[in-house]
Amino acid sequence: MNRLNTDPIALFEAAHEGERLALAKLMSVVERGGDEARLIGSHTYAQVGNAYTIGMTGAPGSGKSSLTSALASVVRSEEQRLAILAVDPSSPFTGGAILGDRVRMQDHVTDEGIYIRSMATRGHLGGLSLATPQAVRVLDALGWPWVLIETVGVGQVEVDIAGAADTTIVVVNPGWGDAVQANKAGLMEVADIFVINKADRKGADDTRRDIQQMLELSSLGDWEPPILMTVATDQEGVGALWEAVNEHRSHLQSSGELTSRRSVRTQEELLEIVQRSLEHRVATLMDGPTATKLREELAEGKIDPYTAASRLIEMDES
C-alpha cells in the first residue's frame, strides 16, 4: 500500500511539497481524530504561529459564503494565499455543505493560492470544537498565511468556533430581527467586525443604527467593532472589509492582545480536551458490566447513588 495512505507524517511532508491530494487526506485524518490526528498535532505544534485566522459567522442565508468568496478575490488580488474552512457542526452525515460551498466559490477552486475544505463533525472526540483548531494548526504549519473559518449558523457551537479566530466577522442582513438575533446568539461578545451584507436592501441603515445602539450598551475595550456595508455578489464594500481585518490585526499586534488571545484559546482548548476525554472515559465506564450490576443494586435499593458512583470512580482509577 502506498505509504501516503497509511503514514500521517508522510502525508504532512507531501502536503508541504504542495501535493493537494495529500493535504486533503491529511485534513481527513484531522477530522476523524484518534491517534493519527494526535500524532499530526504533536508534529505540527512547534511549527505554528505565523497564520492569521479570520472567523465568519451569521444567520443562515446572510450571504457568508458569497462574502467569503468575494473576500478571497480581494486577498488574491494582493497575491496572498488563503485557506478556507467551511464548517458545518450540524451534519455528521452529509460531510458538510461541500456542494453548496464549492458552487458559491467556484471561481476559486482551481486557484492554487486558495484552499477550500468543508468540515463536519464525523465522530472526532469533542467534535469540531477540537477538530477546527487542529485543522488550522495543520494549515499554519504548511505555510498558509491566512485561514478563514466560515460557520453555517449562529448556534453556540458556531459562535465558539468562529470566536476561536484572531478576528471574528459577524454577518447580518438588513432588518431589525436579524440584529436582535445576533445579540441573542452571543455574537455581540465575539464580534470584532460587523458586516451588513445585502446592504442594497431596504432597512440597511436601520440595522446599522440598531447594532450601533447595542454596541453602546456593551462593555467595549480599546477596539470598537466597525459596522460595514457590503453587497458581496457585486463585490461592493469588500475591499473596505479587508482593510478592517488588517486594521484589527495591527491593533491586536501593537496592543499585545494577539498574543494574549492566542494564549487564552490554547488554555481553553486544553480544558476542553481534558473534559472530552473524561466524558469519553465515563461513557465507557457506564457501559461496562460493573456499572450494570451497580445499577441493578441501585434499583433494588441495596446501594445509594453516591456509593455506586464512588465504586465506579475507584474502579476507573485502579
Image (cartoon, rainbow, N blue to C red):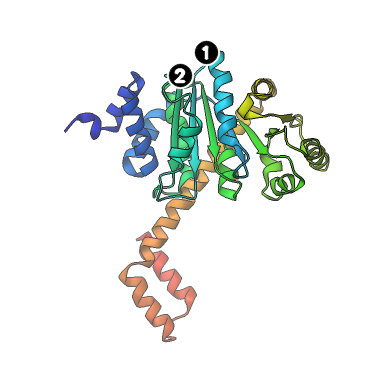
**Front residue of 305 and 127:** 127
**Which quadrant would residue 151 be assigned to in this image?**
top right
Q: Badge 2 is on which residue?
A: 113
Name of the residue lying farthest toward the left: 1
Within-10-Å neighbours for mark 1: few <14, some 14–19, many 20+: few
- Residue 111 lies in quadrant: top left
Assess whether mark 2 and mark 1 are in contact (beta carbons under 8 angstroms): yes
Residue 112 drawn at (x, y percent): 42, 19
Q: Which residue is mark 1?
A: 79
Mark found first going from the N terminus, 1 or 2: 1
Give the structural element (helix, strand or loop) at label 2: loop
The reply to whether residue 54 is visible in this rendering is no
Query: In this rendering, is residue 226 above or below 159?
Result: above
Residue 260, given in percent of the width and then of the height, sits at 62, 31
Of residues 85 and 218, the one drawn nearer to the viewer in this rendering: 85
Residue drawn at 30 percent across, 32 percent down:
8
Asked if 130 appears above or below 71 in the picture, the reply is below
For residue 314, side relative to residue 1 (left or right): right
Position of the N terminus by quadrant: top left
**Amino acid type, callout 2:** Gly
Amino acid type, label 1: Glu
Q: Nearer the viewer, residue 161 or 314?
A: 161
Q: Is residue 203 left or right of residue 290?
A: right
From the top left corner, tell me how far across and down residue 264 is, in percent.
59, 37
**Residue at 69% across, 21% down:** 240
Secondary-structure class at tag 1: loop
Q: CA distance from mark 1 to mark 2?
A: 8 Å
